Structure formats: C-alpha cells, structure tokens
Amino acid sequence: MNRGTTVCVEGDAMQPAAARFHLSDTADTPTTPGLAVVIGARGGIGAGLMARLQASGAHAEVVGLSRQGEPWIDLTSEGSVAAAAAAVAARGLPLRLLVNAGGFLHGRGMMPEKGWSQIDPAHLAHAFAVNAVGPALLVKHFLPLLPAEGRSVFATLSARVGSIGDNRLGGWYAYRASKAAANQIVRTAAVELRRRRPQAICVALHPGTVATALSAPFARGGLEVQTADAAAGRLLDVIAGLGPAQSGGFFDHRGAAVPW
Ligand SMILES: NC(=O)c1ccc[n+]([C@@H]2O[C@H](COP(=O)([O-])OP(=O)(O)OC[C@H]3O[C@@H](n4cnc5c(N)ncnc54)[C@H](OP(=O)(O)O)[C@@H]3O)[C@@H](O)[C@H]2O)c1
C-alpha cells in the first residue's frame, strides 16, 4: 500500500487530543533493563515494533513471538500461551515490556460485516478468540511475570472501532465487539495489577490507521496512513510516557485517551 492511501479501518483520521496526558505527568521510575516481548512479531505493526525496540538498545533482550518459530504462540491456544510465558520466564530477565500486536479483522473466508444480515457465529467466535480471549490469556500467563519492583508495561493493541462511545458508523460487529471486550479485560486486569504490582502499567492502545495486511482490503485513496514503522515509533513514544496513573486506560498513538 502506498503512502497517500487512506484505510477506513478506523474512520478516525485525526481525532482531537482532548484527554492527552503529558510525559511530565508520568512517574517513570528508573529501572534495570530487562526483557521486551512482542506478540504477533511477524505482523505489520509487530515487525515495526521489533525493529524499533532492537534498534533502541533500551532492553537487555527483545523477544518476538508469533505462530512461527520457537517458542510459538497462538492466541487461540492456552497451552501455547502458557508455554511461551514459561519460556520467557526462563530467560531470567525482568519482563519490562510486553506489547500484543496480534489481532484478527479478516481472513479464513471472513470479512467484516456490513450489516446484521452478515452476522455469523463462526466469525464472531474467531474474532473473540483472537482479539479478546487472546489478550485475556496473555493477562493470565504474562502479568504474573512482571517484576515486583520497578516500572513495567503490558500493552495490547486495540482499535478505536472497539470504542462503544465513539461508534457512529456501525457495521463490523465481530471486530468492534471483540475489541470492546479486550478493552474491558485490560481495564479489569489493571485493577488487579494495581494491587499486586503498583508500579506496573496495563493499557489498551489504538495504533491509528496503518498500512498493513490487516488494513489493506479497506484502502481508499485520499488521506495519508502511517507506515508500520511510523506507527511503531508513535506507540513506543506513548508507552515511554505512561505512568501508573495511566494504567487501565485506552490511548491512541498520539497519547490521547479514547472513549470507552
Ligand atoms: N492496521 C491498522 O490500521 C490497525 C488499526 C487499528 C488496530 N489495529 C490492530 O493492531 C494490531 C496489529 O495489526 P496489524 O495491522 O499489524 O495487522 P497484521 O499485519 O495483519 O498483523 C496481525 C498479526 O496478528 C497475528 N495473529 C492473527 N491471529 C493470530 C493468532 N491466532 N495467534 C497469534 N497471532 C495471531 C498474525 O500472525 P501471523 O503472522 O502468524 O499471521 C499477525 O502477525 C491488531 O490487533 C489490529 O487489530 C490495526
């Protein structure tokens, strides 16, 4: 996809940053370098995150997990999530950052629903398995790995179309509902995490419109979309600015709060 192409995946080209937080508002406690993990590391945004994290040198080790390689991870398989978490724990480094860049919008003969006549239980089930149950399994198996001391971040890529308050266009039942469910899981996990790891942060992030395989079928001429590299850079900037006060939030790639 060329730059200069619009993807109507989010329909949010330039939202106002009414509730943007400021980096100076955050309590970024210095911590020892540790491990950064990207789930969905072979996807468009996931690969961009991997490249940026590896180039930054900010982490002692950067691990990319996907459905290929060893250990592999399939978000629809709890066994694979548990095994991947065990392999990460075995590295013996504090888990300072986990970003889940896995997600499902189309594929396996399924396309986003244009209206209620297209609602399909199998489509709904698969979208929920990848986009909502997947992050829940990551919460279950990876949040316990966050260190007891110092700053750490668990971020899962959501989507603005998962916002109930921002839903004006309708359609896309499975994707919208599964991302809304993921947002609730993040919020719920953040409440529990605050008790167990007060310095840890758990958030949902909207990456903006990004030129990837996920968005390609919905490309339209017009506004510019981000490259995966640019989106990864913005997401990592947002993550760097998060403090415990932002845990449980839903933020876009500019750091603006997205309505639930
Ligand atoms: N692109 C956008 O405009 C946009 C907008 C809003 C939100 N997002 C969100 O951003 C995230 C990344 O999307 P992207 O644009 O980078 O899409 P992408 O290039 O299609 O990457 C999606 C990734 O999800 C992985 N995945 C799918 N099903 C999986 C499963 N069952 N288990 C493990 N991994 C699975 C894929 O793995 P394989 O490599 O093994 O296929 C792929 O790496 C998604 O959550 C998406 O909803 C994207």
Image: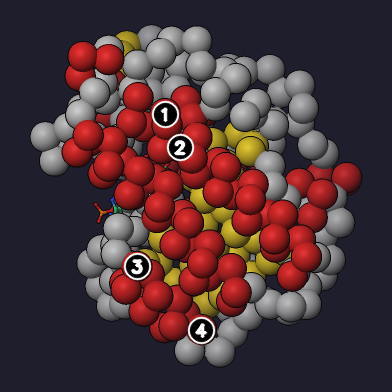
> Mark 1 highlights which residue?
176
| For residue 149, side relative to residue 100 (left or right) | right
Question: Do the residues under discs 4 and 3 have CB atoms within 8 angstroms?
Answer: no
Q: Are marks 2 and 3 in contact (CB under 8 Å)?
A: no
The residue under the point 76% across, 61% down is 194
Residue at which label 2 appears: 179
The mark nearer the N terminus, 2 or 3, is: 3
**72, 232: nearer the viewer:** 72
Earlier residue among tags 4 and 1: 4
Local secondary structure at mark 1: helix
Q: Amino acid at mark 4?
A: Ala
Disc 4, disc 1: CB below 8 Å? no
Task: Identify residue for label 3.
Answer: 78
> CA separation, marks 4 and 1?
33 Å
User: Residue at 33% of width from left, 31% of height from top?
Assistant: 174
Task: Please name whichever residue, 42 or 227, is drawn nearer the observer in this view of the structure.
Answer: 42
Q: Are marks 1 and 2 in contact (CB under 8 Å)?
A: yes
Q: Residues within 10 Å of mark 1 (few under 14, many from 20)?
A: many
Residue located beneath label 4 in the image: 89
Q: Position of residue 252 (x, y in %)?
A: 61, 34
In which quadrant is the C terminus drawn?
top right
**Residue 7 point in image, percent of width and height:** 36, 21
Residue appearing at x 78%, y 73% in the figure: 150
Q: Are marks 4 and 2 in contact (CB under 8 Å)?
A: no
The mark closer to the camera, 4 or 2, is: 2
C-alpha distance separating marks 3 and 1: 23 Å
Which SS class for mark 3? helix
